[in-house]
Image (cartoon, helix red, strand yellow):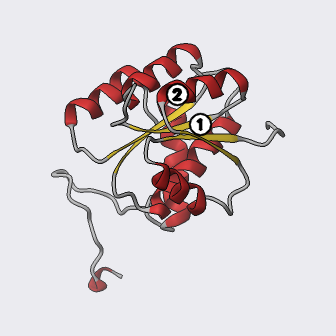
């Protein structure tokens, strides 16, 4: 386990959104840095050890997808999350396929779901070997664990029949 405090970098060109996200996460144990543009975010990454970057998609100077691609190339160990106010399936697919996105949020975001995703991402960072890139199996295991923590019993679904329907026992079966 990494004993150094984990660091999250929030990137958005709307200062009010950055402040709101910072406020929502203030009780958490990780350090939070902010940048109001892609170039500022890249400058911070040169100076700071960051484990997780959350970036908006639509920004001036450099869009979030371009920023996250550059981060993936230079810092493959950093876990990436994207926020967007635009439900563009092409962008979503590009983010998943080309960047290896951990999570993708549509604005307005649920702060509880956002906090859950941040904590899951940072647990992923803690669980893997230093310098390794997150695998989809690790991501899936951590997300399932977080879901089970938030919704106890959700992963203990009943068996399915041949057509894929869940078999629910009736009172007469017991």
Tell me the tag on residue 135. 2
Badge 1 or badge 2: first in the primary sequence: 1
Report which quarter residue 46 is drawn in: top right
Eye-nearest disc, 1 or 2? 1
Q: Position of residue 81 (x, y in %)?
A: 46, 39
Other-residue count near label 2 (Cα within 10 Å), few / some / many at <14 / 14–19 / ≥20: few
At a point 60% along the width and 51% down the height, the residue shown is 119
What residue is at 51 percent from the left and 68 percent from the top? Answer: 152
For this rendering, which residue is in front, 98 or 141?
98
Regarding residue 3, the answer to whether it shows in the image is: yes
Image quadrant holding the N terminus, namely: top right
Residue 158 is labelled as none
Going by the image, does 132 lie left or right of 55? right
With respect to residue 26, does 142 lie above or below?
Answer: above
Q: In x, y percent, where is residue 75?
A: 59, 19
Question: Could you tell me residue 147's position as x and y percent?
Answer: 48, 58
* Residue at the (72%, 29%) spot, across then down: 49
How many angstroms separate mark 1 from mark 2 (CA)?
A: 15 Å
90 left or right of 157? left
In this rendering, the answer to whether 166 lies above or below 128 is below
Count up the numbered dots. 2
Q: Are marks 1 and 2 in contact (CB under 8 Å)?
A: no
Rendered-image quadrant of the C terminus: bottom left
Q: Which mark is residue 52?
A: 1
Give the left or right position of residue 72, taking residue 166 as reference: right
Report which quarter residue 6 is drawn in. top right
């Amino acid at each position: 386990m990494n004993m150094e405090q984990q660091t999250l970098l929030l990137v958005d060109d709307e200062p009010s959104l950055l402040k709101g996200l910072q406020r929502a996460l203030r009780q958490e144990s990780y350090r939070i840095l902010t940048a109001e543009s892609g170039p500022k975010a890249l400058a911070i990454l040169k100076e700071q050890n960051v484990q997780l970057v959350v970036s908006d998609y639509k920004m001036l100077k450099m869009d979030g997808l371009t920023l996250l691609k550059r981060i993936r190339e230079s810092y493959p160990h950093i876990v990436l999350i994207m926020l967007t106010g635009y439900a563009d399936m092409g962008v979503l697919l590009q983010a998943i396929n080309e960047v290896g996105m951990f999570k993708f949020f549509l604005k307005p975001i649920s702060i509880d779901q956002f906090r859950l995703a941040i904590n899951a991402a940072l647990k992923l960072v803690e669980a893997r070997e230093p310098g390794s890139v997150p695998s989809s199996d690790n991501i899936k295991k951590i997300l399932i664990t977080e879901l089970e923590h938030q919704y106890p019993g959700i992963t203990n679904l009943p068996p399915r029949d041949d057509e894929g329907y869940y078999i629910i026992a009736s009172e007469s079966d017991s």
